[in-house]
């Protein structure tokens, strides 16, 4: 083993790889701006469709631009029979993220402009993926439950239609609002692992769907998007008991956390590579979770939530990330736990595609160096026969 000759930035931690005008994460002020706007303001005042247009175009849409986009998006929500057949062919034992990844790839294969790198074609493909992915996520959850496909409704906005296709009934406006908030908060977060993956693929001048497919693979991991599922699995493992007090639930959660940390486990939903004093998105998502806890009458979740958070803070000073409040929010809405990361996919398609277009517009192949630490140069023994 040779000693490294250069400073290694393991995990590229602290490395500034490029400029971006899509979003700004400021860990010192715990703030997140999409194209300059604080994400909290966007979540409180804008539909997800408006935020998507902001991320792609750099400015919020005017009324006519929004209406045009809504008409386009509503017209392209339905699953094609071919894509439905491909989803049907996938085993229900596979993870729903595998279905999203396959669907993104199929949508590319089906798209006549898949190989057209012009900005107009790239934007149109981003719009189509945005419109199509909710039906993929909802149908996959339904088929696993033995339920039929629910066709989209073009009289509903993105979030209301999403919930309609998932559950086959119109959601309460409070639930639609909380879902919209989660989509806005999950939409974009600068050079996170999946977005950087999408940019790496784009930098080779590969196509947009290949970049999104790769990004979905990166998001699946529990250190990234998969954490929202793991958070809920923790709650389920702890047991959500309606018959215990807040203090009792808190104490059980605290004991669980102490045991997990003593065993040196990573507890999902806590910590962040960039934010070290708290994730800017958590207060807004926690407020949405609180509204859902009231709406569904499930206060018993709060004892566990507070207990884990306090115990982690006391033991390690590590704060929750967005996945922590998002997991139980999706669970209360009725989504199956393995569907949580696909919901993140539907949201993050906006950020990924905004970054893909930004990367393509000012491209340089992303190709870092490595420091070799394998065996020194050596040679095959003379006269070695060729292996058959
Ligand atoms: N549970 C327990 N300990 C943790 C956690 C955690 N969730 N997060 C960090 N730590 C500890 C580490 O064990 C390490 O301790 P040590 O110095 O005593 O060894 C220290 O904090 C630094 O941890 P790193 O993993 O080196 O920090 P990094 O910046 O690389 O990690 C990460 C960021 C990967 C997100 C990490 O906090 C983690 O694994 N969290 C759980 C997964 C998760 O929730 N991911 C979602 C990310 S946000 C999103 O995708 C929306």
Image: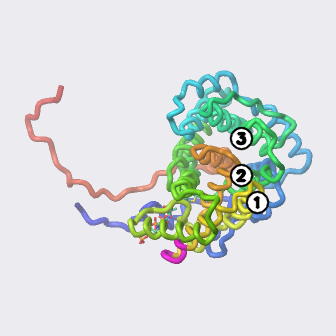
Q: In this view, does 332 lie above or below 84?
A: below
Query: Marks 3 and 2: which is nearer the front?
Result: 2
Q: Residue 242 location in percent, x, y?
A: 64, 59
Number of marks drawn: 3
Q: In this view, does 259 lie above or below 315?
A: above
User: Residue beneath label 3, please?
Assistant: 130
Q: In which quarter of the image is the C terminus?
A: top left
User: Residue beneath label 1, please?
Assistant: 294
**Is the distance from the Cβ of mark 1 to the nearest ligand 1 atom less than 8 Å?**
no
**Magenta residue span:** 311-316
Q: Earlier in the sequence, mark 3 or mark 2?
A: 3
Determine the CA span between mark 3 and mark 2.
12 Å
User: Residue beneath label 2, please?
Assistant: 183
**Is the distance from the Cβ of mark 3 to the nearest ligand 1 atom less than 8 Å?**
no
Q: In which quarter of the image is the N terminus?
A: bottom left
Cβ atoms under marks 2 and 1 closer than 8 Å: no
Which residue is found at the position 56% from the left and 72% from the top?
276
Nearer the observer, 192 or 140: 140
Q: Main secondary structure of the magenta part?
A: helix
Q: In this view, does 318 lie above or below 388?
A: below
Badge 2: residue crowd in 10 Å (few <14, some 14–19, many ≥20)? many
Q: Which of marks 1 and 3 is nearer the N terminus?
A: 3
Residue 360 can be seen in this image = no
Determine the CA span between mark 1 and mark 3.
31 Å
Q: In this view, does 303 lie above or below 242?
A: below
Q: Quadrant of residue 297?
A: bottom right
Which residue is found at the position 70% from the left and 35% from the top?
135
Q: Residue furthest left?
A: 383
């Amino acid at each position: 083993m040779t000693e490294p000759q250069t400073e290694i930035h393991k995990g590229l931690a602290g490395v500034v790889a490029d400029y971006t005008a899509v979003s700004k994460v400021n860990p010192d002020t715990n703030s997140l701006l999409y194209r300059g706007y604080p994400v909290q303001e966007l979540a409180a005042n804008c539909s997800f469709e408006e935020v998507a247009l902001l991320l792609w175009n750099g400015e919020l849409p005017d009324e006519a631009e929004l209406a045009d986009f809504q008409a386009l998006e509503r017209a392209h929500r339905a699953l094609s029979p071919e894509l439905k057949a491909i989803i049907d062919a996938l085993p229900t034992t596979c993870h729903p993220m595998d279905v999203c990844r396959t669907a993104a790839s199929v949508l590319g294969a089906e798209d006549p402009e898949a190989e057209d790198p012009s900005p107009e074609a790239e934007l149109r493909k981003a719009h189509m993926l945005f419109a199509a992915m909710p039906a993929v996520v909802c149908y996959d959850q339904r088929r696993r439950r033995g339920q039929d496909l629910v066709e989209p409704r073009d009289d509903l906005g993105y979030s209301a239609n999403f919930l309609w296709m998932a559950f086959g009934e119109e959601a309460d406006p409070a639930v639609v609002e909380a879902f919209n908030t989660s989509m806005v908060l999950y939409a974009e977060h600068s050079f996170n692992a999946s977005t950087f993956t999408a940019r790496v693929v784009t930098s080779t001048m590969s196509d947009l769907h290949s970049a999104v497919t790769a990004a979905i693979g990166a998001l699946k991991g529990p250190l990234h998007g998969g954490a929202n599922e793991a958070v809920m699995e923790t709650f389920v493992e702890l047991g959500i008991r309606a018959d215990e007090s807040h203090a009792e639930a808190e104490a059980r959660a605290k004991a669980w956390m102490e045991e997990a940390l003593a065993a040196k486990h990573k507890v999902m939903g806590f910590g962040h590579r960039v934010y070290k004093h708290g994730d800017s998105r958590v207060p807004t998502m926690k407020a949405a979770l609180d509204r859902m806890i009231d709406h569904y009458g499930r206060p018993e979740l709060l004892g566990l939530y507070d207990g884990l958070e306090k115990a982690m803070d006391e033991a390690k000073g590590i704060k929750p990330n967005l996945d922590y409040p998002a997991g139980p929010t999706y669970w209360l809405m009725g989504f199956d736990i393995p569907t949580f990361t696909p919901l993140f996919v539907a949201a993050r398609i906006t950020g990924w595609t905004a970054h893909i277009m930004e990367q393509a517009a000012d491209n340089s192949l992303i190709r870092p160096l490595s420091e070799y630490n394998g065996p020194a140069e050596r040679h095959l023994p003379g006269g070695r026969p060729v292996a058959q």
